[in-house]
């Protein structure tokens, strides 16, 4: 019988995975090759280790050729820092005739041909089309410049958890570190929540404003502010001036007024230092918002709902220095350390005492039993060996607020 005809097919880089090409192009001396990356719209974000940095342009070009939807590959060259939580990065590969595109070869010596790259410090650069991304997450369309704001796609599951398990339809959500507003927008879209949002980064607030308009959710936002988070949290306890206006003829304006009570949920997603802002809660009024006279009026009219805010604080937690039992890692040590840190900022020190009423070994029981805080801890993600991000949620009860104000 005659053999079937041979059909020639030219394989392209896109026919292979990036990991396969990297394994065959990079010298064995730098194996294992990098496999972890994050995509933000058309941008691929790499965090390369030292052995891979000399080949960063090759790696970037391989990602471009094996993932056709990408247009820009960046490599973080510093840590997240500064008041805006941004990081310096290097553009190691770009499409469409950029100077940063690079060719690569594989030879016995393992050398490569690299091209020049661009490094940015995120401070004085105009908007750039290569870093202006547009994409959707959970039904919300987002657009922002990655060089100007903080973003982590790894928190998408955490955003979904808060919306699905914590937030209820129509509740008031206050986000002290909102970024470009992914959580706020999704809460408004899925649960019809009312939003008060804040971020110290003007670029983040500007992006949130545009994203709210793009998603036709601007009416869900009661307030947007670009202020210090401590001042923002403090202000939640005071009725804004527009609450005194007569809005009976404008129902839409009435719906955009801040409710006459504290928020149902307050989110502080700034693991590096969020706990230090909890002292602002001592300025929250006990029994309502707007002063003693206004609280009496609302009680007389029976129109002041009792809201006990649920506060969600994100914090870095490390494993306890004491050796765990049976030589096994204990996740409770992370939880204890996270709760202890939160408690140290909530409970003021008493004369002759440490930070709080009791020793730090029972802070969770102290907050739950003495103050009714109903502490819950969720492990968000691992960030390094022995270091995790935890979300500590608690109820800001009247008893807790009175204690923070010195009413022992």
Image: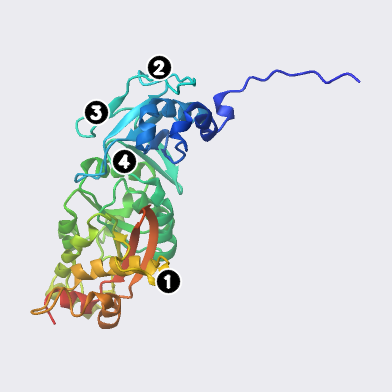
For marks 3 and 1 on the same chain, the one whose residue lies earlier in the sequence: 3
Q: Is residue 131 left or right of residue 83?
A: right
Tell me the tag on residue 326.
Answer: 1
Q: Secondary structure at mark 3?
A: loop
Which is in the foreground here, disc 2 or disc 3?
2
Residue occupied by mark 4? 210
Q: Secondary structure at mark 2?
A: loop
Residue occupied by mark 3? 126
Point out residue 383 in the picture as x, y percentages from the top left corner: 36, 52
Q: Secondary structure at mark 1?
A: helix
Residue 115 shows in this picture: yes
Which is in the foreground here, disc 4 or disc 1?
1
For marks 2 and 1 on the same chain, the one whose residue lies earlier in the sequence: 2
Which is in the foreground here, disc 3 or disc 4?
3
Residue occupied by mark 2? 97
Point out residue 330 in the picture as x, y percentages from the top left corner: 39, 68
Which is in the foreground here, disc 2 or disc 1?
1
- Work out how far the residue at label 3 is from the one at label 4, CA to CA, in angstroms: 18 Å
Which is in the foreground here, disc 2 or disc 4?
2
Q: Secondary structure at mark 4?
A: helix
**Residue drawn at x 39%, y 72% as measured from the top left:** 325
**Can you say whether 61 is above or below 224 in the image?**
above
């Amino acid at each position: 019988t005659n053999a079937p005809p041979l059909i020639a097919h030219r394989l392209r880089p896109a026919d292979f995975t990036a990991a396969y090409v990297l394994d065959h192009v990079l010298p064995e001396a730098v194996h294992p090759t990098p496999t972890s990356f994050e995509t933000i719209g058309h941008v691929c974000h790499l965090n390369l280790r030292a052995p891979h940095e000399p080949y960063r342009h090759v790696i970037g070009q391989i990602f471009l050729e094996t993932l056709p939807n990408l247009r820009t590959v960046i490599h973080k060259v510093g840590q997240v820092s500064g008041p805006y939580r941004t990081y310096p990065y290097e553009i190691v590969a770009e499409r469409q005739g950029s100077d940063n595109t690079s060719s690569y070869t594989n030879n016995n010596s393992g050398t490569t041909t690299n091209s020049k790259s661009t490094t940015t410090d995120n401070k004085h650069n105009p908007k750039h089309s290569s870093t202006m991304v547009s994409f959707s997450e959970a039904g919300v369309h987002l657009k922002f410049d990655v060089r100007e704001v903080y973003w982590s796609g790894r928190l998408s599951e955490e955003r979904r958890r808060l919306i699905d398990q914590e937030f209820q339809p129509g509740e008031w959500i206050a986000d002290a570190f909102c970024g470009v507003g992914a959580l706020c927008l999704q809460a408004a879209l899925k649960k019809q929540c009312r939003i008060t949002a804040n971020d110290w980064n003007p670029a983040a607030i500007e992006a949130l404003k545009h994203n709210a308009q793009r998603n036709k959710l601007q009416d869900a936002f009661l307030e947007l502010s670009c202020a210090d988070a401590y001042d923002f949290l403090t202000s939640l306890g005071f009725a804004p001036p527009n609450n005194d206006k007569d809005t009976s003829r404008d129902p839409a304006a009435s719906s955009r007024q801040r409710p006459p009570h504290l928020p149902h949920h307050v989110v502080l997603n700034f693991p590096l230092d969020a706990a230090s802002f909890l002292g602002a809660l001592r300025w929250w009024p006990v029994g309502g918002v707007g002063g003693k006279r206004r609280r009496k009026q609302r009680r007389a009219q029976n129109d002041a709902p009792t809201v006990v805010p649920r506060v969600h604080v994100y914090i870095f937690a490390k494993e306890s220095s004491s050796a765990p039992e049976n030589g096994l890692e204990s996740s409770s040590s992370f939880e204890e350390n996270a709760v202890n840190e939160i408690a140290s900022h909530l409970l003021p020190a008493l004369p002759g005492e440490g930070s709080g009423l009791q020793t730090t070994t029972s802070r969770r029981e102290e907050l739950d039993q003495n103050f009714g805080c109903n502490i819950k801890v969720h492990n968000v993600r691992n960030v390094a060996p022995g270091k995790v991000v935890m979300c500590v949620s608690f109820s800001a009860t009247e008893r807790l607020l009175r204690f923070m104000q010195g009413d022992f």
